[in-house]
Image (cartoon, rainbow, N blue to C red):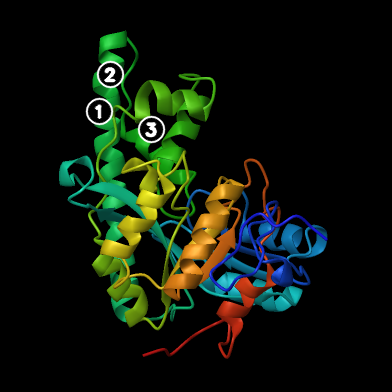
Amino acid sequence: MPLCHGKDLEGQCLDGARGVPYTEKKREMKIDLHIHSKEGSDGHWSLAEIFAEGAEKRRINLISITDHDSISAQGQAIELAKAYGMMYITGVELNVTFSHPAHKGGKAVSLDCLGYQFDIDNTRLVKKLDALRDYRKRRATLILENLNRAFAEQGLPAFTAADLDAIEAGVDGAIGRPHIATYMVNKGIVSDQQEAFDRYLVACDVPKMPLSLQEASELIRGAGGKLILAHPNDPNGTSLVSLTSAVQDQLQIIHDAMMAYIDGVECWHSRHDVGTIVAYETFARSAGLIISGGSDCHQHPVLMGEVDVPDYVGEHFLKGVHAAMRGAP
């Protein structure tokens, strides 16, 4: 008889190694609903490479490409999934601005949300993502201006318009700070991406185009999709940790201020520990929220399919719904 590591709200024992009820531990499907591509945003691999690896070597059955503020790769992803016999749901990762009066004095912070199963041809969604992409280009210019001020203090040569062109030439999707960091490594300014962020890109950052949680919800739901709070306890990412590191306080924030706008939470994530998974899964069940999970793989390193997401997560999404949604209201 396995040791019981606590019970969920239905009285079932939770597996301490997985954070899921013993009765739902089956792993007949391999699921990864959080992957970034080179075509769409800041992944290191092309879609062709991702799907070849995912299908042939990692045996992923249900997959979603969730690029930052971009759905430009969705059409190709749908076709590749069909070619490899994989189940696919449309995806995108949106950065939102959020505040809570009980934390940080009500100061706004950045959070990430995942949109799933939306119509990729929805006019309002496409127009908004185009605007976000255009702003990312302007933001990159402003970041380079800030970097030039820092370089001047250190006697380093300034970036020019040619440098911006070179950075953009290496971007297939939405431009962001990781692309600038890669260029700085290639120029020999820093030794790796982490040094680029630590020494320059954090201090020289420029705010992203504001998108409220309510607006993100309206965009995704208006396109027939579902909005999921991404990696809520990720210590290294844009998460509720920026408001509080206490998981119970995070859950209270969701209960108090987010329930009207989200359809689920990402419980399984490459940087969520067992305690986080257990707490968030139990909360999601009690609140009637969809449970999601994925690796957040940017192929550096390659983590696709390595987060042990249980089958019922896929069933939440696939129940009565076709993967590639076109013509949603």
Location of residue 289 by image quarter: bottom left
Residue position marked by numbered label 2 in the rendering: 150
| Label 3 residue SS | helix
Q: Amino acid at mark 2?
A: Ala
Which residue is found at the position 62% from the left and 57% from the top?
6
Q: CA distance from mark 1 to mark 2?
A: 7 Å
Tell me the crowding category of disc 2: few under 14, some 14 to 19, or many 20 or more residues within 10 angstroms, Cα based: some
Q: Could one spot residue 174 in this view of the protein?
A: yes
Asked whether 119 or 307 is in front, the reply is: 307
Q: Where residue 109 appears, x then y in whole percent? A: 27, 46
Asked whether 244 or 211 is in front, the reply is: 244
Q: CA distance from mark 2 to mark 3?
A: 16 Å
In contact (CB < 8 Å): disc 1 and disc 2: yes
Label for residue 163?
A: 3
| Label 2 residue SS | helix
The mark nearer the N terminus, 1 or 3, is 1
Asked whether 209 or 33 is in front, the reply is: 33
Label for residue 146?
A: 1
Q: Would you place residue 178 above or below residue 233 in this image?
A: above
Q: Quadrant of the C terminus?
A: bottom left
Q: Amino acid at mark 1?
A: Asn
Q: Where residue 57 appears, x then y in whole percent? A: 81, 58
Q: Quadrant of the N terminus?
A: bottom right
Q: Where residue 147 appears, x then y in whole percent? A: 30, 25
Which residue is found at the position 39% from the left and 20% from the top?
199
In contact (CB < 8 Å): disc 2 and disc 3: no
